[in-house]
Image (tube, rainbow, N blue to C red):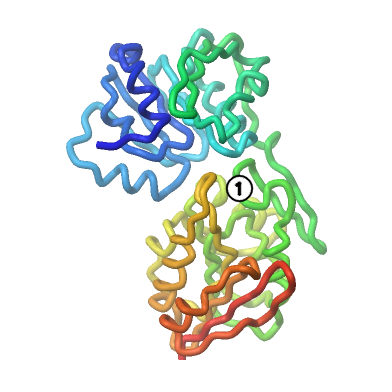
Amino acid sequence: MLFSKTSQLILRNSKIFEKKKVFFSGNIKDKFPMYLLTNKTIINFPKYNDYINFQKIKNIKNVDIYNNLLISKKMIQDCNTIIYYWNKNKSESEFQLINIMSCFSIGTEIFIVGNNSSGIKSAPLILKKLINLKIIDNAKHSILIFGCLIKKIKFVIEDFFKIHTWKEFFIKSLPGVFGYKKIDEGSKFLASTFSKNITGKVLDVGSGTGFLSVSLLRSSPDVILTLIDNNVAALKCSKETLHTNHLKGEVILSDLYSNIFNKFDLIISNPPFHEDLKINFNIIKKMIFYSIQYLNRNGEFRFVTNSCFKYDFLLKKTFKKYSILKINNKYKVYQAFLI
């Protein structure tokens, strides 16, 4: 089995972990944790699809898996070692690591692994007040950093929320969630197409901070909203944004449409075209192709994308009618109809 470069780095240091009770988390992109010989292995996946894919593996012995936003002392049981895969987003890694380390005792061994391009070399500086880290191995443009927890950490999730204001609404976001630093201009461009003429049931795919849903409710307060996302942190933000603004919507953890069993009059989205550090159009392709299964007869799929990207071929192949609803020099909004 082919492992990622980061997992291969842990593999060549595998003897360290043979008698350890190991907690894995972070940007895990392969099945390596189930093959590492340990006394006990516990894994937490921030992304729902990673969790589901790992669940499908048969004959997993001595391994417990979770899909939680926050780590608890009950979850980690008596683990004495952390292996964390560094994210491309430094603030997301800091958020996750502080939460993880707050559940462990002083002296816990921590191994952080990541690609050089992800910014992992900044980890010792970011975490210097909590742990002394040093590089213990490097290969194939990846590094492995080690340290021991030197002080007890208090974690308060409210300290990590950013609150953006838009019109009269508050948009809450956590590190690693799209739109964390500021409200995305593409999302604003899509929101500018919403009007009071929109009615019925609406599905917000990849809801993130919940900005699109709030924008839609501002112009069409009577729509029935369902928000879905693959990221547990994004789902938390969507819920918090709705609650803060006293708005209603059903929030569901779902890998695209995997946990959706109803049909809608409108599907809205600002779909991603990156996966980690690489451009990847697979998500938007699947979103377009499978959307017709979740639309009512006269339903519409409306999404925003960079103006340089073209999805005409996919839309023409999937829908009977489509058009560009709005365009400028940076973004364009497609709308496609199932009629």
Can residue 201 be seen here? The reply is no
* Residue depicted at 69% across the width and 79% down the height: 326
Residue farthest left in this picture: 59
Residue farthest bottom in this picture: 339
Can you say whether 166 is above or below 80 in the image?
Answer: below
Residue 42 screen position, x and y as percent? 36, 28
Residue 50 screen position, x and y as percent? 39, 45
Can you say whether 183 is above or below 34 in the image?
Answer: below
Q: Nearer the viewer, residue 77 or 13?
A: 13
Residue farthest right in this picture: 167
Can you say whether 197 is above or below 275 in the image?
Answer: below
Res 327 quadrant in image? bottom right
Q: Mark 1 sits on what residue?
A: 177
Using residue 257 as the reference point, say whether residue 322 is left or right of it: right
Q: What residue type is labelled 1?
A: Val
Using residue 327 as the reference point, say whether residue 152 is left or right of it: left
Q: Nearer the viewer, residue 331 or 154?
A: 331
Using residue 244 as the reference point, say whether residue 120 is left or right of it: left
Residue 313 screen position, x and y as percent? 47, 79
Can you say whether 252 is above or below 287 in the image?
Answer: above
Residue 14 screen position, x and y as percent? 32, 17
Q: How crowded is mark 1: few (under 14 residues within 10 Å), some or many (20 or more)?
A: many
Q: Which of 56 and 12 is in front in this view?
A: 12
Res 149 quadrant in image? top right
* Residue depicted at 52% across the width and 64% down the height: 205
* Residue depicted at 36% across the width and 16% down the height: 13
* Residue depicted at 29% across the width and 44% down the height: 55
- Count of labels shown? 1
Can residue 177 be seen here? The reply is yes
